[in-house]
Amino acid sequence: MAIEVKDLMGRVAIAVRQDASFADIVAAMRRFAVGAVTVIDAERRPVGVVTADDLLMKETDPVRHSISIYESRRQRAEHEKAAAVTAARLMTSPAITVAPRDPVRVAARLMHDRHIKQLPVVDPDTGRIVGTLHQRDVLRVFTRPGEELAADVRAMLPERGAYTVEIDRGVVRVAGAAERRSQVIALVERLRAVEGVIDVVADVRCDVDDLVAMPPLL
């Protein structure tokens, strides 16, 4: 069974209003020990995100109050953030969000592809923020109870065929016999897709290697 965002997310929505000051944002990050906060509108809907990197612009940009016509768009944006003092000016918009029923695997892919460490979780009906999903929350899938992980792994085994399964710290070892090699490959892919599986080692014999194409005889 796929683990969903709602199963791992924090129920505390770490957010600030658009008019929150620089100092307010820093205080919120320190209080909750996070590296980013969601910026919300008056209806509690995410409109952007402020990260610690955005705040560090204030310290690292020595010419933040000067604008040059030779600057790139990125440099100009960095100077503007360095001069900003409210969440509305500091934030990156729009906010990248997930819904409570989204698979955790989808959220993990978003984090990886967008290089972000946390995601606001929004109610799909109202658009309001209902929680926050952090990288550390996603990594909890690798600490699932052994019995729970084993049950999901065994549910992926085909009904026909004799297989034995051993699980050691998230590594699944499956042994047995199959008719075709393609069936073994498909089984390994299914097992690797189980939430919490770190790796799969297959020691499965097959009668036919149907992945090898033989050239025609001349």
Image (cartoon, rainbow, N blue to C red):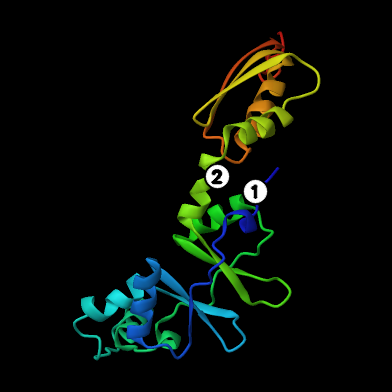
Instruction: Please indicate, yes or no, whether residue 109 appears anywhere in the rendered image.
Output: yes
Q: Is residue 185 left or right of residue 81?
A: right
**Dot 2 crowding, Cα within 10 Å, few <14, some 14–19, many 20+:** many
Element at badge 1?
loop
- Residue 129, above or below 111: below
Residue 155, picture quadrant: top right
**Residue 156 shows up from this direction:** no
In 3D space, how far apart are the residues under numbered discs 1 and 2 (Cα atoms)?
8 Å
Residue 177 location, x and y as percent? 70, 11
Give x and y (percent) for residue 147.
Answer: 62, 32
Label 2: which secondary element: helix
Decide if residue 98 is on the left or right side of residue 21. Answer: right
Tell me the amino acid under the disc marked 1: Ile
Residue 28 pos. (x, y %): 39, 76
Q: Which residue is mark 1?
A: 3
Q: Residue at x 53, y 72 (%)?
A: 13
The residue type indicated by label 2 comes to: Val
Which quadrant of the figure contains the N terminus? top right
Q: Where on the picture, by quarter, is residue 161? A: top right
Q: Is disc 1 in contact with disc 2, using a CB cutoff of under 8 Å?
A: yes
Mark 2 sits on what residue? 141
Q: Which residue is rendered at x = 56% and y = 35% of the image?
A: 197
Looking at the image, residue 197 sits to the left or right of residue 177; the answer is left
